[in-house]
């Protein structure tokens, strides 16, 4: 099992890995969760998949086991910035505007984590390892980007596994029900891991 952080700058070094990540996202979010999201050529994508973002892929011999997208809160693409901020501004009607307890930050040391998933067909005996690889890569990415904080919209059961993952996490907003699932914005503190 390997973990790779992809960017527009390096994805050519990894063959089909980026396309496979978007295919796995489609399977997870469109097929499994039945979310109404853009897709093309069997891949899920959205307005936040730009050169400003990075993508973490946990993979084994080309098969994507899990992944996530990291976007700086300073990103801009047309009217869009990053998902949590755009939801707060009313640009994403499927996400409540009051998802965050404060004004969504825009700062180079704060990044957003979105589209996190573990593939539905990953065997139960390695799911925890896939999650662990994703957490390790988050810490590595935080150091690389100089990010002391990351925001994520996660299932509200995050408190069950936050300590086990070794992440300093705190609620950043209220619990919301979307598509029958309870979600909450969470802030992850990486300030102690930057050195």
Image (cartoon, grey):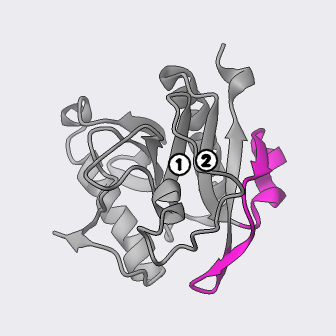
Q: Is residue 23 left or right of residue 172?
A: left
Q: Residue at x 75, y 67 (%)?
A: 174
Q: In this view, does 51 lie to the left or right of 110?
A: left
Q: In this view, does 133 lie above or below 102?
A: above
Q: Position of residue 145 (x, y in %)?
A: 48, 25
Q: Is residue 12 left or right of residue 84?
A: left
Q: Residue 151 carries which label?
A: 2
Q: Which mark is residue 175?
A: none
**Quarter assignment of residue 157:** bottom right
Q: In this view, does 43 lie above or below 111?
A: below
Magenta highlight range: 156-182
Q: Distance between the residues labelled 2 and 1?
A: 6 Å
Q: Can residue 151 be seen in this view?
A: yes
Residue mark closest to the camera, 2 vs 1 = 2
Q: Do the residues labelled 2 and 1 touch (CB within 8 Å)?
A: yes
Q: Is residue 157 magenta?
A: yes
Q: Quadrant of the C terminus?
A: top right
Q: Which residue is drawn at 69% across and 46% down?
A: 187
The residue identified by callout 1 is: 113
Label 2 SS: strand
**Front in this rendered view, residue 178 or 90:** 90
Going from N to C along the chain, the mark reached first, 2 or 1, is 1
**Front in this rendered view, residue 83 or 40:** 83
Question: How many dots with numbers?
Answer: 2
Q: In this view, does 178 lie above or below 154?
A: below
**Quarter assignment of residue 14:** top left
Q: Position of residue 96 (x, y in %)?
A: 58, 74
Q: Is residue 79 left or right of residue 1?
A: left
Q: Is residue 115 visible?
A: no
Label 1 SS: strand
């Amino acid at each position: 099992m390997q973990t790779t952080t992809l960017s527009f700058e390096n994805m050519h070094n990894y063959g089909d890995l980026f396309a496979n990540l978007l295919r796995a996202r489609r399977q997870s979010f469109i097929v499994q969760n039945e979310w109404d999201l853009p897709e093309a050529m069997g891949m899920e994508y959205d307005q936040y998949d730009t050169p400003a973002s990075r993508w973490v892929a946990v993979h084994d011999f080309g098969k994507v086991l899990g992944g996530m997208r990291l976007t700086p809160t300073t990103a801009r693409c047309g009217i869009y910035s990053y998902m949590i901020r755009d939801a707060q501004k009313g640009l994403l009607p499927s996400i409540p505007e009051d998802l965050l307890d404060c004004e969504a930050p825009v700062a180079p040391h704060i990044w957003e984590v979105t589209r996190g998933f573990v593939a539905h067909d990953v065997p139960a005996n390695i799911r925890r390892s896939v999650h662990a690889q994703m957490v390790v890569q988050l810490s590595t990415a935080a150091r690389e980007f100089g990010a002391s904080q990351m925001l994520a919209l996660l299932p509200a059961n995050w408190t069950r596994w936050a300590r086990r993952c070794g992440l300093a996490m705190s609620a950043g907003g209220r619990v919301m029900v979307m598509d029958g699932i309870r979600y909450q914005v969470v802030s992850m503190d990486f300030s102690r891991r930057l050195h």
